[in-house]
């Protein structure tokens, strides 16, 4: 069961790392926009969206404040946008791998509270990474796919982006308001498999 004491801090931390990674990547690749707006930081307060955080508390689904990026500042806009989009999920995956190694090797075994917090952050990081890698706008996976598609297919993808976005929102609302949760079904099993493989025991999802 999700509780504020364990899961909400883990979600906020994972969201902050995710958005900070986007900002750092854009800054490194030459776009000053995130730095100018104070987003090149690990401070969670800089990356929290008011509505996204409120919904996170109320319905256990939320989002961070998107990092503004201006592709015109990149040397290779199409490629660099893919790298910026990939940075967020990759940061979550790296976080999960490092913390899973700590758990697997018995780190913090004598500190149950810390172990539970790390366990939660591993699970949330994996969930956030896999969710954002879905190729549905406005998720990172859609930006990655758009950057990798042949240029000739770009107009077609742009035309179907809006219906896909509304479909994602509908799935989120349905999953939050009922027992039918297709997104949860899609994500929880892979996360459970990855967690067990990395940590060596079943997760608590």
Image: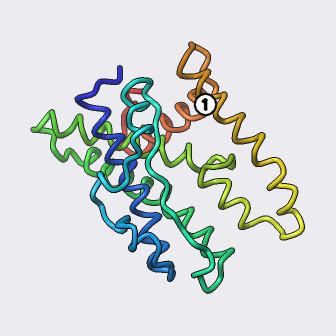
What residue would you read off at disc 1?
183
Q: Is residue 14 above or below residue 36?
A: above
Residue at (63% x, 49% y) in the render: 138
Residue at (15% x, 44% y) in the render: 108
- Quadrant of image for the C terminus: top left
- Residue found farthest to the bottom: 75
Number of dots carrying numbers: 1
198 and 91: which is toward the camera: 91
- Quadrant of image for the N terminus: top left
Q: Quadrant of residue 168?
A: top right
Residue at (67% x, 48% y) in the render: 137
Q: Is residue 19 above or below residue 180?
A: below
Q: Position of residue 118 (x, y in %)?
A: 26, 42
Q: Position of residue 83 (x, y in %)?
A: 57, 70
Rendered image coloring scheme: rainbow
188 and 15: which is toward the camera: 15
What is the crowding at mark 1: few (fewer than 14 residues within 10 Å), some, or many (at least 20)? some
- Residue found farthest to the top: 179
Q: Position of residue 181 (x, y in %)?
A: 60, 22
Q: Is residue 190 above or below residue 3?
A: below
Q: Quadrant of residue 78?
A: bottom right
Residue at (38% x, 37% y) in the render: 53
Q: Secondary structure at mark 1?
A: helix
On screen, residue 62 versus residue 158, left or right, reads: left
41 and 140: which is toward the camera: 41
């Amino acid at each position: 069961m999700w509780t504020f004491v364990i899961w909400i801090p883990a979600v906020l931390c994972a969201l902050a790392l995710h958005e900070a990674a986007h900002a750092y990547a854009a800054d490194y690749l030459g776009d000053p926009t995130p730095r100018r707006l104070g987003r090149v930081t690990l401070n969670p307060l800089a990356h929290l969206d008011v509505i996204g955080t409120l919904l996170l508390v109320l319905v256990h689904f939320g989002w961070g404040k998107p990092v503004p990026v201006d592709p015109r500042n990149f040397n290779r806009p199409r490629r660099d946008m893919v790298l910026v989009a990939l940075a967020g999920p990759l940061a979550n995956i790296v976080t999960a791998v490092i913390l899973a190694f700590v758990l697997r090797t018995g780190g913090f075994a004598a500190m149950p509270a810390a172990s539970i917090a790390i366990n939660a952050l591993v699970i949330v990081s994996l969930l956030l990474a896999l969710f954002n890698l879905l190729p549905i706008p406005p998720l990172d996976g859609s930006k990655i796919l758009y950057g990798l598609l042949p240029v000739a297919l770009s107009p077609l993808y742009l035309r179907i982006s809006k219906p896909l976005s509304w479909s994602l929102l509908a799935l989120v609302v349905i999953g939050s308001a009922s027992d039918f949760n297709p997104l949860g079904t899609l994500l929880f099993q892979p996360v459970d498999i990855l967690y067990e493989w990395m940590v060596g025991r079943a997760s608590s999802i």
